[in-house]
Image: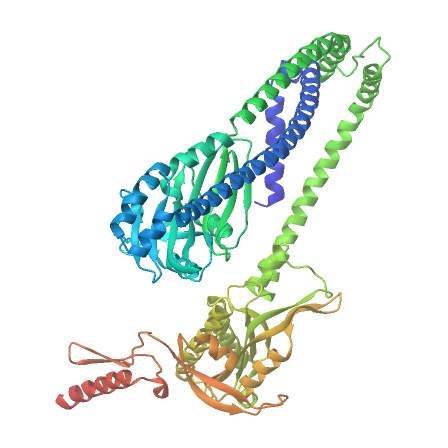
């Protein structure tokens, strides 16, 4: 059944179903004009309110966000001020110790115990610093700090960064910097470090080194958080070393800030809150840590909620007012429409003489007048339409049969891929559009076909040629090749259009197709020789891969969908240069198939029309294929069955040659024994 017949059946079924339904027109409450007016006015009102609300809330959002950005920036700047002050305090504390007369005397006397005993109360009083005193040679004389700190876990000596600061201080320089300290477990601890020389008579006799370790001074950061009214966190390698709340950062974001020095802010007026990130660097610009200031977005959420509630109340009030107005207005429209609907039901029942009378003079009244005029013409139109329908159905049936016949015939003149592309509407019938595409092109030709034609009758030759071409075409379709044309005994096939997979797949399918064609031709020669054909066909084949121009070529009245270009000519030249029953493939094709097809070098060829010699290869076999060299089968040790199979000895592997020799030896032994 054609598509048109299916549509006709569906239409007729719908008409019959409609005639069996309730005879009178009726309007559902949901579909009435009153309901639609109410819905439309409500939709318009709600849309206006929503647009106003969205505009207002959007403006409020961006205004608030701008204020939030300014606020969080001020907070992190204030945090920088506090931390810079703490950094300066660290230096001042180191200077006060270095200037202490008792410290100078303790260093001169090299009294480690006295230095430690003297420093202990001062460090305990501050409760936030680590103090180390070195002699002029850089050896530790006193090391005072929080003994329960993780910084001292496995720590036996100062870290390399502290060593750098110490060496600078020994050069009579005051040092204040931000570095990462390292304990014995190779864990990092960001800290402010100050190193001040202790001098006597303008000579450096020792060094006082003071460190303010971030992770051991939670009280300072807690106080800073209260002053800023926001939470703080300091990260090293994306891990928090100190935080006043459960804050986190991704490693990627950390690297952007610490390594790429991209200070960022992430502002969200919803649950994510206000976040400002800033890198903490040493004096020479090395990344030490990342400072994170966080401010809750709860106040903004509360404000937005209140604004949304106000707009919701406003919207409800507007909708109530509009609904009342719609009910009053719709009543003046419904009565004439009801009269019109009653008259339509009478006419629909078959009484075409019934006249609809409406007293209103608006659009509904004019609609009633127009309906009366239409009713008068309806009866005479019905008969005309029925006659036209009967003629149209017959015409559609005839055209459908003609189209199906033409389609069936056209399939035999086009390749399956091209036919499907044209039938599906993917191809335009135009000679103006062409495009470049990388294809694999295959040519085959019968060797000495002219001599064969001279020794055969035309009828026998036609049957033999058709048998050959039919077998070749079946193999081409099996491998998905597009048969471009038959030119006498020659066959042209290409891969890659209209169906594209990959260049390697196209080349593999083309080579495997050619190898199977040669195998099938060898089998056909045995059949033809058995049928008395004196000169059965031998073929040569050529394959090349490259860019071609593809499209419709010809005139507007007669055109061919084909390919042209230098690579097409090159494939034809390879075919002409090939020996009988062999395939010559180009270097480009060889590079695509060499992993799956075993090939033999055929040397270089100087081809007609090609400026320089080109390499060529002969495909030998598909790698890892299970190819049997057995030609003879022995049954029950006495029956010899010769299989109808051709084996090319030149392409056999050592294992296959051995199997063939063993097969022949078994036959020889059986015949000799009999």
Q: Is residue 68 above or below residue 540?
A: above
Quadrant showing the C terminus = bottom left
Quadrant of res 138:
bottom left
- Would you say residue 246 is visible in this rendering? no
Tag count: 0
Please, is residue 133 above or below residue 299 in the view? below
Q: Is residue 425 visible?
A: yes
Residue at x 85%, y 14% (from the top left corner): 362
Q: Is residue 303 above or below residue 174?
A: above
Image quadrant in which the N terminus is located = top right
Give the image quarter of residue 666.
bottom left
Residue 12: x and y, percent?
A: 62, 32
Residue under the point 39% across and 48% down: 210
Please name the residue shown 83% across and 14% down the image: 365
Percent x, y of residue 452 = 53, 88
Q: Nearer the viewer, residue 90 or 75?
A: 90
Please state which of residues 519 and 571 is positioned toward the viewer in this rendering.
571
Residue 97 position, x and y percent, is 39, 47
Which residue reaches farthest right? 361
- Figure check: 178 above or below 36: below
In the picture as drawn, the residue positioned furthest to the left comes out as 673
Q: Nearer the viewer, residue 206 or 149?
A: 206
User: Residue 340's x, y, as percent?
Assistant: 76, 13
Asked whether, in this view, residue 32 is left or right of residue 188, the answer is right
**Residue sitting nearer the eye, 610 or 64:** 64
- The residue lying at 37 percent from left, 48 percent from top is 101
| Side of 418 relative to 598 (left or right) | right
Q: How is the image coloured?
A: rainbow
């Amino acid at each position: 059944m054609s598509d048109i017949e299916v549509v006709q059946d569906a239409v007729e079924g719908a008409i019959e179903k409609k005639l069996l339904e309730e005879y009178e027109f009726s309007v559902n409450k949901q579909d009435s004009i009153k309901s639609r007016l109410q819905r439309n006015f409500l939709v318009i009102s709600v849309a206006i309110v929503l647009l106003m609300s969205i505009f207002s809330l959007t403006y409020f959002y961006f205004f608030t966000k701008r204020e939030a950005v300014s606020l969080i920036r001020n907070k992190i700047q204030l945090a920088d001020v506090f931390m810079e002050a703490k950094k300066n305090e660290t230096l001042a504390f180191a200077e006060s110790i270095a200037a202490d007369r008792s410290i100078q005397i303790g260093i001169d006397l090299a009294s480690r115990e006295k230095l430690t005993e003297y420093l202990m109360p001062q460090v305990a009083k501050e409760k936030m610093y680590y103090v180390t005193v070195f002699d002029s040679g850089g050896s530790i004389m006193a090391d005072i700090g929080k003994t329960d700190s993780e910084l001292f876990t496995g720590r036996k000596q100062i870290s390399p960064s502290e060593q750098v600061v110490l060496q600078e201080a020994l050069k009579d320089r005051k040092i204040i910097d931000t570095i990462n300290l390292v304990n014995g477990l190779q864990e990092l601890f960001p800290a402010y470090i100050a190193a001040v020389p202790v001098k006597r008579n303008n000579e450096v006799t020792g060094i006082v080194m003071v460190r303010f370790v971030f992770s051991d001074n939670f009280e300072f950061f807690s106080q800073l958080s209260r002053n800023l009214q926001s939470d703080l966190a300091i990260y090293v390698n994306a891990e928090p070393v100190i935080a006043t709340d459960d804050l986190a950062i991704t490693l990627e974001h950390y690297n952007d800030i610490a390594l790429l020095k991209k200070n960022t802010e992430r502002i969200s007026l919803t649950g994510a809150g206000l976040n400002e990130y800033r890198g903490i660097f040493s004096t020479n610009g090395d990344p030490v840590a990342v400072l994170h200031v966080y401010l809750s977005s709860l106040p903004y959420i509360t404000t937005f909620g209140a604004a949304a509630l106000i707009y919701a109340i406003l919207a409800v009030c507007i909708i109530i007012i509009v609904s009342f107005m719609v009910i009053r207005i719709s009543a003046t429209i419904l009565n004439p429409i009801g009269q019109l609907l009653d008259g339509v039901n009478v006419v629909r029942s078959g009484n075409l003489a019934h006249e609809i009378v409406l007293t209103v003079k608006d659009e509904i009244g004019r609609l009633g007048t127009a309906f009366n005029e239409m009713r008068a013409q309806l009866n005479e139109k019905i008969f005309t339409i029925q006659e036209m329908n009967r003629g149209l159905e017959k015409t559609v049936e005839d055209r459908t049969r003609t189209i199906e016949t033409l389609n069936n015939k056209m399939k035999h003149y086009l390749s399956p891929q091209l036919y499907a592309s044209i039938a599906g509407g993917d191809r335009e019938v135009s000679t103006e559009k062409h495009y470049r595409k990388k294809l694999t092109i295959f040519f085959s030709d019968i060797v000495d076909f002219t001599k064969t034609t001279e020794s055969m009758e035309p009828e026998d030759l036609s049957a033999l040629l058709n048998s050959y071409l039919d077998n070749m075409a079946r193999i081409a379709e099996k491998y998905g090749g597009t048969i471009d044309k038959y030119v006498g005994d020659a066959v042209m096939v290409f891969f890659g259009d209209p169906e594209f997979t990959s260049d390697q797949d196209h080349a593999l399918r083309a080579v495997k197709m050619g190898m199977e064609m040669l195998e099938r031709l060898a089998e056909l020669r045995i059949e033809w020789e058995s049928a008395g054909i004196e000169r059965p066909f031998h073929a040569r084949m050529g394959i090349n891969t490259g860019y071609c121009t593809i499209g419709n070529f010809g005139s507007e009245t007669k055109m061919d969908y084909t390919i042209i270009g230098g690579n097409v000519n090159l494939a034809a030249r390879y075919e002409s240069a090939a020996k009988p029953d062999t395939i010559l493939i180009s270097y480009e094709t060889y590079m695509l198939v060499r992993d799956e097809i075993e090939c033999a070098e055929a040397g270089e060829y100087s081809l007609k029309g090609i400026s320089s010699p080109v390499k060529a290869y002969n495909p030998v076999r598909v790698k890892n294929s299970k190819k049997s060299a057995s030609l003879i089968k022995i049954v029950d040790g006495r029956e010899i069955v010769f299989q109808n199979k051709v084996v090319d000895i030149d392409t056999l592997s050592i294992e296959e040659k051995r199997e063939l020799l063993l097969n022949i030896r078994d036959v020889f032994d059986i015949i000799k024994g009999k």
